[in-house]
Image (spheres, rainbow, N blue to C red):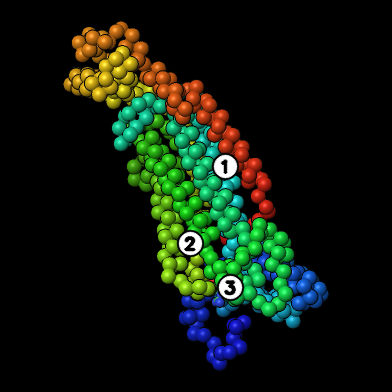
Amino acid sequence: MALWGGRFEEGVDELTQEFGASLPVDKALYRQDIAGSIAHSAMLAAQGVISQEDADAIREGLLGIQADIDAGNFTFDINDEDIHMSIEAELTRRIGDAGARLHTGRSRNDQVATDTRLGAKALAKHLMEQNLGLRRALLDAARAAGTTVLPGMTHLQHAQPVLFAHHLLAYTWMLQRDFARLAAAFDAADANPLGAAALAGTSYPLDRQMTARDLGFARVIENSLDAVSDRDFLLDLEYACSVMAVHLSRLSEEIVLWSSQEFGFITLSDAFSTGSSIMPQKKNPDFAELIRGKTGRVVGDLVQLLVTLKGLPLAYNKDMQEDKEGALDAAHTLSQCLTVMRGMVSTWTVNADRMRAVMHKGHLAATDVADYLAKRGMPFREAHAVVGHLVLTAEKRGVDIADLPFEEFKAASDLFEPDITGALDLDAVAAARTTQGGTAPVRVAEQSEKAEAAYAADEAALAALTPVVEMGREA
Ligand code: ARG
């Protein structure tokens, strides 16, 4: 009979037992559940609701169960429905009456909210660490790239030369925003629901500040109904995961392109490539593709929870049991993606010569030629048309605008002087982009310092986070 079986005459059908159970998913939260129960029972004793001896026995019993699960010596029984009842039933088997007193003044509704919030904090923190790991790899790769230039693109067409370092740093800023989103998700989860009980609070003199302190929650949730029905913190976490996954997917797409024969900008290390079972020559960017693919799954997890919560009346509804699987999956999937991406970035070989070689396609200096005329008095629109015509001439001859003889320039406009050839040098073109945030080497060096400072600030923010209840082996 289930722990709630008192008002029932028959047990539930075997099928519904399995259908209703969340144990296969929420056993991932066993450490959070045990931490919550230890804090709750210590508070019950401090408030005189249970004896100190009972609280001590509960604590010892729970730590024993935790050690057994940690060591893989615990058999979960699906008939226990969820992690809360599984642990409580085992505790009572081990220590008797004291175990049966644990649930005084508590409901699984505030219990599961507590466990899930503690879990969300651990996951967010873990992802923040990994976010920094990938940023470190990108910052190092940007530094190693020096002043290597590649064709910057819009619409995937050659546009203007940019520093490869500049391109990589763009991803560090995306990841910096992802870190901020994770920190916000951590903060959203950082509030104590314990004491809300089923939905309305309880008549026991519970000290919610004490359990908040013991569990490392920054604050207490002010409304008992909100405490048991809020899952915004999971949405925040899954949104943060989704945006970061989209960022990794965009980088993955670039890796797939860059490592193709057509681009050849990078060569992936063997450790982060795969072969083909039929084509002996193949070296495929499978892992970049897989990160791109797994992004759909992470975004799907977010959408699933949004749809699950939509239309739920206050307070707890069993639908909410569907909240954890996606959140755990999103965090776990993203965690794997971050690890693999870090490995790919830190072991690829950059083919700077190849980047430079393809710069001579696509008339990358065209904007600067137009600017040359505009700076000598020609209205920019007119200059644009003159240079467009030069590009057409070059296209017809099958050359780049930079390869046209000076006479062609002079014929197009009298404003051209022999120094125009200097304006066609692609390093100079990149170096001329000196606006703040531009791709000129001086600006990229400044930007790199700022990106390092942002990294250091986030590293400090991570170190300053309150300790979390780490996920255990079932996660
Ligand atoms: N297994 C449940 C969940 O994950 C725990 C809360 C159940 N509460 C209840 N009243 N049925 O949401």
Q: Disc 1 designates what residue?
A: 132
**Residue at disc 3, secondary structure:** helix
Q: Secondary structure at mark 2?
A: helix
Q: Is mark 2 within 8 Å of ligand 1?
A: no
Which residue is outermost to the right?
53
Q: Position of residue 12 (x, y in %)?
A: 52, 85
Quarter of the picture containing the N terminus is bottom right
User: As displayed, is residue 221 above or below residue 84?
Assistant: above
Q: Is mark 3 within 8 Å of ligand 1?
A: yes
C-alpha span from label 1 to label 3 = 35 Å
Question: Which numbered disc flags the more N-terminal residue, 3 or 2?
Answer: 3
User: At which x and y percent is residue 271?
Assistant: 49, 40
Q: Position of residue 258 (x, y in %)?
A: 38, 35
**Amino acid at the residue labelled 1:** Leu
Q: Residue tagged by mark 3?
A: 109
Q: Secondary structure at mark 1?
A: helix
